[in-house]
Image: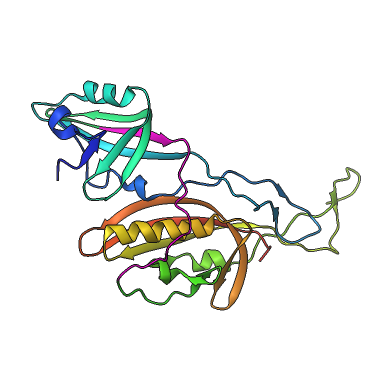
Amino acid sequence: MVKNVYIDGVDVRTVYGVWVVKGGYNDLFSFPSVKSPDANDWPEHNGLEVDTAAPMLDTWAVHLDFISSGVSADMAGFVSLLSSPGYHTFTFSSLGRPFPLRLDDSIDLKTYAALAAFRLRFIQDQPLRGGTAGSPSPGIPVIQSAYILNGTGFDSYGVFVCSGRSSLLKSPPVKTQMQRHISTIDGQLYDADQVRFAYRPVTLQCCMKASDMSRLWNCHRLFFENWIQARERTLTYKGRSFTCCYESCRNTRLVCIGSLCMIAFDLNIRIIDGQ
């Protein structure tokens, strides 16, 4: 499909000879990172004390990969369109929703005899929260998940975890306690009477699937909204519970589209209770 992107209602393939390459809009399935919250890392307590009263989203950056080719190719005119003031509404025929973005940077350009391939970075300065209203409904069977977020199984959102169990279950690092280095003795003096464990990052490599794109976006919205609600999140795996908070969603990609829609992504969280 070459007429696959419209910007402010303009078919840029017809006007500028530009379209998005296959896989070139994978970043659109990501989710903004949270701003680093205030935290205290007390050496005498396990884990990390994090202010989770009101998690705030950071700006949302996405990269799009384009091709410019054909008799109407006008890459300069296309970039001029994107450089005009204000946000520009990107609409992709197959994705079923608009994306208001502004141009931020040109990342890469490769020229060949008949075409140019280039990557641009766009920003959404104030990401919109979708809210928690409604219920997730993937519309297709999803195997029951061993992962439960605040009482709701991942499968309710059409999500299954491909890998990451080892990252979740491994032992946390030990916090460094009071120590002194003295030049007149070997080694050091260390408070070995107290052992406490630190927080740790965990990455779960996930897939989300639904029967159609509309259901996929609804599951996507509700899944990540659950992660960014006020107060700490509780992730349960086979009866073992971890206190955690959301960090980011990376390496997103559209796996398939049609009668089945599926995306893959890395879910990055922090286990903050010292487990």
Lateral position of residue 33 relative to residue 8, left or right: right
Q: Residue at x 54, y 54 (%)?
A: 228
On the image, the x and y values in percent for residue 219 come to 39, 61
Q: Residue at x 45, y 45 (%)?
A: 128
In the image, residue 132 lies in the stretch drawn in magenta: yes
Q: Is residue 56 visible?
A: yes
In the image, residue 270 lies in the stretch drawn in magenta: no
On the image, the x and y values in percent for residue 18 come to 19, 32
Q: Nearer the viewer, residue 229 or 186?
A: 229
Lateral position of residue 2 relative to residue 140, left or right: left
Q: Quadrant of residue 4?
A: top left
Dominant secondary-structure state across the stretch colored magenta: loop
Q: Residue at x 38, y 40 (%)?
A: 62
Residue 111 drawn above or below residue 217: above
Residues rendered magenta in the picture: 118-139
Residue 4 drawn above or below residue 120: below
Q: Is residue 160 visible?
A: no
On the image, the x and y values in percent for residue 8 come to 26, 33
Instruction: Farthest residue to the front: give it.
Output: 133
Q: Quadrant of residue 246?
A: bottom right
On the image, the x and y values in percent for residue 215 come to 32, 61
Lateral position of residue 74 relative to residue 41, left or right: left
Q: Quadrant of the C terminus?
A: bottom right
